[in-house]
């Protein structure tokens, strides 16, 4: 049995993790891939919570604010988009035999449980995967901030930021062959260099509570398992 370093993790996914062609919509095959990746670490005995964005269904700035929509309305629509993604991922996980609960920051009781911190921890202790939908339930806060907040509330040992790049770079490695790759950063370095890992509120929250962040390519085979086993993968951001 593999040695496990992190027994409880929060996995932050962007909406593009489930996206169909062109980065929009929900592709069931993508959902199945993410579910299979998550099930691999669940089967190692790791407790997994997930926060997922909604950018594949709704981009508040492009689709709303740039056309005169009120910010609060645009943000509420974005929250509902994350609930749709959460339900799609829950379906994919449960078809693989992984018991899953969706908990939301705004009440949609017909399809998901309202978020209650103690209940969330109990689900994890019983071996269920939790997907947190609707962000924090408040406008003006990103799903990055929701991920940091929920990770602290459930006492996660690491926040894993899933991307399609193998680590954090100082510029886009697809456009710049000389882009510098970081294996380790401090919170202050990540903030000062404006690397775009997470928004500043989320990063500051992790820094204040000494929660490590690991940025990793979820689509690299075995990467998530290697992270929970404590192997050096991607970029680690700590104090």
Image (tube, grey):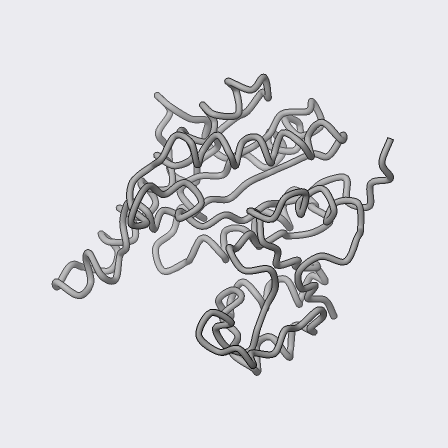
Viewer-proximal residue among 183 and 42: 183
Residue drawn at the location 79% of the way across and 45% of the way down: 229
Residue found 62% across the figure and 48% down from its top: 151
Q: How many marks?
A: 0
Placement of 119 over or under 14, stated as above or below: above
* Residue 181 x %, y %: 63, 73
Q: Residue furthest front?
A: 177
Side (left or right) of 212 relative to 70: right
What residue appears at the point 56 percent right and 32 percent down from the top-left corner? 130
Question: Horizontal and vertical percent for residue 144?
Answer: 49, 56
Image quarter in which the N terminus is found = top right
Relative placement, left or right, of 175 versus 6 is left
Q: Quadrant of the C terminus?
A: bottom right
Above or below for 82 versus 44: below
Q: Quadrant of residue 64?
A: bottom left
- The answer to whether 45 is drawn above or below residue 190 in the figure is above
Residue 182 locus on image (x, y percent): 66, 73
Q: Left or right of 66: which side holds 29?
A: right
Q: Is residue 124 left or right of residue 3?
A: left
Of 6 and 36, the residue lying toward us: 36
Give how far across and how far down residue 132 sits, in percent. 49, 39
């Amino acid at each position: 049995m593999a040695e496990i370093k992190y027994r409880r993790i929060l996995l932050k996914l962007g909406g593009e993790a489930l996206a169909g062609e062109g980065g929009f919509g929900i592709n069931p095959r993508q959902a199945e891939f993410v579910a299979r990746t998550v099930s691999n670490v669940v089967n190692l005995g790791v407790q997994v919570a997930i926060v997922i964005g909604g950018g594949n269904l709704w981009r508040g700035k492009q689709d709303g604010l740039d056309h005169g929509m009120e910010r609060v309305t645009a943000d509420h629509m974005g929250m509902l988009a994350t609930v749709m993604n959460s339900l799609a991922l829950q379906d994919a996980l449960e078809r693989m035999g992984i018991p899953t609960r969706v908990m939301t920051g705004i009440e949609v009781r017909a399809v998901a449980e309202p978020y209650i911190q103690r209940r969330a921890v109990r689900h994890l202790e019983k071996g269920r995967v939790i997907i947190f939908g609707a962000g924090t339930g408040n406008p003006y806060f990103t799903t990055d901030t929701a991920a940091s907040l929920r990770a602290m509330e459930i006492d996660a040992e690491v926040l894993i930021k899933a991307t399609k790049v193998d680590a954090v770079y100082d510029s886009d490695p697809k456009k710049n062959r000389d882009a510098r790759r970081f294996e380790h950063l401090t919170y202050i370095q990540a903030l000062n260099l404006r690397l775009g890992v997470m928004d500043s509120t989320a990063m500051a929250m992790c820094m204040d509570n000494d929660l490590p962040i690991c940025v990793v390519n979820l689509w690299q085979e075995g990467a998530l398992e290697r992270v929970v086993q404590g192997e050096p993968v991607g970029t680690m951001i700590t104090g």
